[in-house]
Amino acid sequence: MKTIRYLIVLSFTIGALIFSGCSGLQKMKKNAGLIQFKTTPKTLETHAGKVDVSIDTKFPGKYFDKKATLVATPVLKYDGGETAFNSTNLQGENVKANNKVINYDNGSSIAYKGAVDFNKAMNLSDLEVRMVASKGKKEVVFNPVKIARGVIATSTFYANMPKAIIGVRREANNTGKYDPNIDPFQRIVPDELMADIHYLINKADLRDDEIEADDIKKIQEYTKDAYNSKNKELKGVQITAAASPDGTIDLNTELAAKRKDTSAEFMKESLRKSGVETNLKTRYTPEDWDGFKELMEKSNIRDKDLILRVLSMYTDPEVREREIKNLSIAFTSVAEDILPQLRRARILTSIELIGKADEEILALAESNPSALNPAELLYAATLTENPDKKLSVYQSFIKIYPTDWRGPNNAGYILVKQMKYAEAKPMFEKAEKLKSNESIVKNNLGAIALYEGKLKEAEEYFGAAAGSGSEVSYNQGLLNLKKGEYSKAVRYFEDDADVNTALARILNGDNSGALKDLEAFTLPNCYMKEYLKAVIGARTAKENMVIESLKAAIGINPEMKAKASTDMEFAGYFDNAKFKALVQ
């Protein structure tokens, strides 16, 4: 009998303890509505492919059981699935663990931050907090608490269209930088040829060995050929006679003038015999100090630097001559090697080389591209607006000039224009093999990486492409837009205006600037332009802009109807009759 009575008392005691443990947890569950949750932002947003959330939670006093532990998990619940954020563990004052402690008497405030990968189904979703309280081996599951609705996904609405650079520019002044206004193809190319008739000291008469020299015969033939050729134009012939800078200025002036006359008469007769009619200009220089300086700089004459210093110190020709003659040893070499070359009349024929007409170049590009030089073949691609024909020209270029990087690069450029990034990639890779340090190719490979979502790789390429064109800045802006660095994106987009630049401004809080960019963007039938205008309308409480712009976007692309119906940018219009009529 005593045993039975003992068991009854023990069972009652255990039951009381169990009931006591559960009652504390049940009370927490019952009063869970007293817990205050505040999310930042109020409606979640996705940036750089993540959904970040900050939750400030306030537990009231006399709520959290001193011996209880609570596991809280924010969960995004959406049609077809759910995604949980990391859980956080909390504990009462008497729990011996390392979790955040909630004060029983006064309550506590807890700050939580978390992030999950974004997917499109999250647009229409509920953020709820799921809590499980436990004490010893007992646990109670709370009813989920809904604390926010939906995810704004405007940051994902960019045009994934990185820009490539065409390889027709040439380096300016060997600086390694590119001038976008310089093209390698020049239909009219200036050319010239020079020849000298030399005279004996203090003489102005022509010598047979001079006027029959090879360089004189060559310039005579050059001039005649230019006059008679269909693809050349003779611009003129100029004769400049001079004396060497020794002797008196009066003597040298007379000598130079006579040399001008004798050389001009010779050239006039030569042109007459060749049947060439052209403008013959003549002039003379009494003492050719410029020629003297040029020859001295190229010479190995002793005391060369000292003589050049004399030229820089004195401008009076007589003083120059006296000071140089004082360098007796050096002047002997000057008199033998330099001065005879300055007793001359210089003949200069100027011509223009006339290239093929556009029609001829384009026809040859299609029928016989090997008849065109590289510059002409690259130019041929600019003579048609048809992208397939442009691509065909560049494919011909690749076959004919297989070691020139511009062929595959430009083929890739056209493929990018056609949104065929996957096909463009091997073209740019081939161009890089041909010219590994080419900054234009670096940009283009960066464009491929950016399109593929390889942001770190793209950033490295764009760094190597710095200075090679405005396209690099644009691509940097698009890169920063994807990374969620909107202020940086706006800076890189400074010289552009399109849907991406407008999106960056919207996300950076500049709705007015975004609207200006969209109005400046004139691409016809751009649904993204109209849709972003509707977003600006929603953000600035302009109902007419929302409805009219959405109507235009849906008219261009009916798929925008479904997008708008779940876009939390328009949450304030979900019950609007005009909005519902558009999206249903």
Image (tube, rainbow, N blue to C red):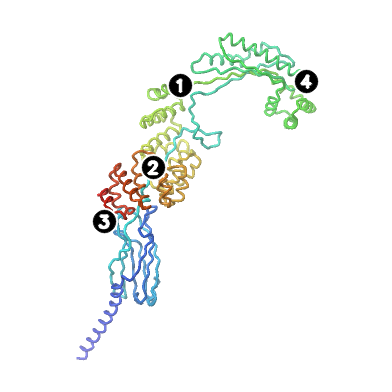
The Cα atoms of the two marked residues, 3 and 2, are separated by 31 Å
Rendered location of residue 63, percent (x, y)? 34, 75
How many residues crowd around disc 2 within 10 Å: few (fewer than 14), some, or many (20 or more)? some
User: With 474 as the anchor, is 347 left or right in this view?
Assistant: right
The Cα atoms of the two marked residues, 4 and 1, are separated by 53 Å
| Quadrant of res 51 | bottom left
The answer to which of 202 and 218 lies nearer the viewer is 202
The amino acid at mark 2 is Met
Residue under label 4, please give it: 248
Seen as rendered, the residue at the extreme top is: 273
Q: Earlier in the sequence, mark 4 or mark 2?
A: 2
Identified at 80% across, 27% down, the residue is: 326
| Quadrant of res 190 | top right
Q: Earlier in the sequence, mark 4 or mark 1?
A: 4
Q: Secondary structure at mark 4?
A: loop
Residue under label 1, please give it: 356
The Cα atoms of the two marked residues, 4 and 2, are separated by 74 Å
Q: Earlier in the sequence, mark 4 or mark 3?
A: 3
The Cα atoms of the two marked residues, 4 and 3, are separated by 103 Å
Q: Earlier in the sequence, mark 3 or mark 2?
A: 3
The amino acid at mark 1 is Lys
Label 4–label 2 contact, CB within 8 A: no
The Cα atoms of the two marked residues, 1 and 3, are separated by 65 Å
The amino acid at mark 4 is Thr
Q: Secondary structure at mark 1?
A: loop
Q: Is residue 335 above or below residue 305?
A: above
How many residues crowd around disc 4 within 10 Å: few (fewer than 14), some, or many (20 or more)? few
The amino acid at mark 3 is Asp
Residue under label 3, please give it: 79
Residue under label 2, please give it: 161
Rendered location of residue 398, percent (x, y)? 41, 31
